[in-house]
Amino acid sequence: MDLIKKANKMRLSKRVERAGLASRRKAEELIFEGRIKVNGEVVKIPQTQVTEEDEILFDDTPVQSAEKKVYYILNKPAGYLCSNKRLSKRQRLVIDLFEEDKRLFTVGRLDKETKGLIIVTNDGDFAQKVIHPSRNIAKEYLVKTDRDVTSDHLKVISEGTLIQNAHIKPHRVVKVRKGTLKVTVLEGKKHEVRLLIEEAGLKVLELKRIRIGGLSLGALPEGAMRELTLNQMESIFE
């Protein structure tokens, strides 16, 4: 199944509503009355699936297209919040790094001091598909600690810990070098990786997310972003 193309489709009634023409209920009434055309043909079924490329007419007048959907991969620097609400003038938000005038938001969150891969978009349907627990999408983190990571540390981390009243275990834990390891999780609980590391008696010096599903951060510089290709978006779900 092409998840991305499916995500870009929407009900005709929703497309009419997003264009600011009417509320969802009123949009359905207009469709039932035969006042909406799709690509020159009258359509009376609100559930009809349409895309941004389809021509929608209301009483033979073109309906404004919904806001263009955009998708970015960002290498988030430390010190930036994954939020659209600024509680003080001194706070720096991830969306401050973008010049877009569209209503952007992050797909899920990284805590303020965690760096690395974050997806930024204005597509709520796509974001929900990425973060929904049923997808079981793996997130991989590179962790630098304050000392050499031993086999005992790895064992404790692998056994998991209690987070939000549930016992959470990482999907995979691998030592990279002396004080560095990779931790892969599926649940995505708040501060999950930090809590797993602290449970083993280690101090986190640097935490960086490097992969979501099949999408890797690669060599993207810190603070830089680029638009995701369709293949990259689909790789998230592989």
Image (spheres, grey):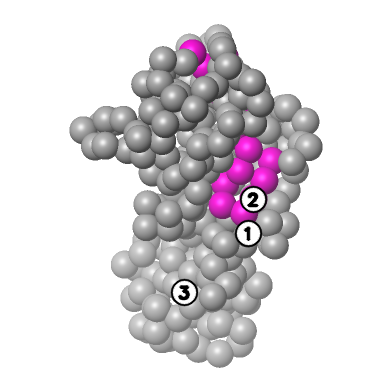
Residues at marks 1 and 2 touching, judged by CB atoms closer than 8 Å: yes
> Can you identify the residue that label 3 sits on?
12
Vertical side of 43 occupied by 110: above or below:
above
Residue at coordinates 49% horizontally, 13% vertically from top-left? 203
Secondary structure found at label 2: strand
Q: Distance between the residues labelled 3 and 2?
A: 31 Å
- Residue 182 location, quadrant: top right
The span shown in magenta is: 203-217
What amino acid is labelled 2 in the image? Leu
Front disc: 1 or 3: 1
Horizontal arrangement in the rendering, residue 18 relative to residue 166 (left or right): right
Crowding at mark 2 (Cα within 10 Å: few <14, some 14-19, many 20+):
many
> Can residue 138 be seen by looking at this rendering?
yes
- Residue 45 location, quadrant: bottom left
> Can you identify the residue that label 2 sits on?
215
Q: Is residue 209 found inside the magenta-colored segment of the image?
A: yes
Q: How far apart are marks 1 and 3 (CA)?
A: 28 Å
> Can you identify the residue that label 1 sits on?
235
Quadrant where the C terminus lies? bottom right
Residue at coordinates 45% horizontally, 24% vertically from top-left? 153
Crowding at mark 1 (Cα within 10 Å: few <14, some 14-19, many 20+):
some
